[in-house]
Amino acid sequence: MKNVNIEAIKTFVESGRKDTNQFRKLMKVEVKWNADESKPQMSSVLETPQGQFKIDIDSPPFMGGKGASVSPVQLCLVGMLSCFIGTFASICAEEGIEVEELSGIIENNINLERTFGISNAPITEKIKIILNVKGKGDIQKAKKLAMERCPAIFCITNPIPVDIEVRNS
């Protein structure tokens, strides 16, 4: 599998087996609301080992934004799909599955009745991921393992406590 540093993964896993605390990582992102109506509603500066990246976020017009940038739901879907594809690619590399091409599409059927206080219907009715894989080997095994191991898939298929703290600054 190209573009997967399997040696870095092996080193991390071996190190983590000696000290399992290394497997625990705090992921933290800050999003700021923008009161300037000429700009997208929100922005975030994301930290990576390679530096900082700023992204703008704006709700679509039917949600009160201008649609001037990616929406929060689009970012959620990109995160979910890229997490799954990354997990799938890593598993292919670990299992020696040859993959020449890999891409995916994610679809989210949403019902905004709850969002607008109309009903208590579920907001997300269905999420569908379509993987396009050109390769040799047990692709179905890799899919099964990716579904079991992907952090994003875990988050949407298991109840996770959410603690929201509002600070008056």
Image (spheres, grey):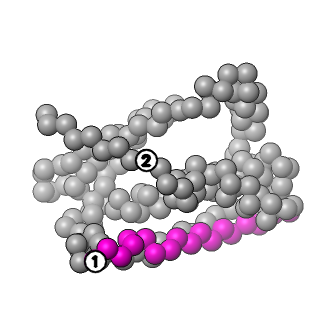
Name the secondary structure under disc 2: loop
Q: Nearer the viewer, residue 118 or 7?
A: 118
Quadrant of the image occupied by residue 4 = top right
How would you classify the magenta stretch by its main secondary structure? Answer: strand
Q: Tell me what residue is drawn at x 39 percent, y 72 percent.
A: 122
**Mark 1: secondary structure:** loop
Q: CA distance from mark 2 to mark 1?
A: 23 Å
Q: Which residues are magenta?
A: 119-136
Type of the residue with mark 2: Pro
Examine the image and state in which quarter residue 97 appears: bottom right
**Could you tell whether 139 is left or right of 167 in the image?**
right
In the current view of this chain or complex, which residue is farthest to the top?
Answer: 18
User: Does residue 135 belong to the magenta stretch?
Assistant: yes
Residue 11 in the figure: left or right of residue 84: right
Residue 160 lies, with reference to residue 50, above or below; the image says: below
Query: Is residue 38 shown left or right of residue 81?
Result: left
**Above or below — where is 89 with respect to 111?**
above
Of 2 and 31, nearer the camera is: 31
- Lower position in the chain sequence, tag 2 or tag 1: 1
Q: Residue 129: image x %, image y %?
A: 59, 69
Question: What's the residue at 83%, 56% (across, down)?
Answer: 98
Residues marked 2 and 1 touching at CB (< 8 Å): no
Say which residue label 2 marks: 161
Seen in the picture, residue 50 relative to 34 is either above or below; the reply is above
List x then y, in percent, for residue 25. Answer: 53, 32
Give the residue type at disc 1. Answer: Ser
Q: Is residue 76 magenta?
A: no
The residue depicted at 21 percent of the width and 48 percent of the height is 33
Assess disc 1: are there few (<14), some (14-19) or many (≥20) residues with their C-alpha within 10 Å of its C-alpha.
few
Residue drawn at (71%, 35%) of the image: 9
* Numbered tag placed on residue 119 in the rendering: 1
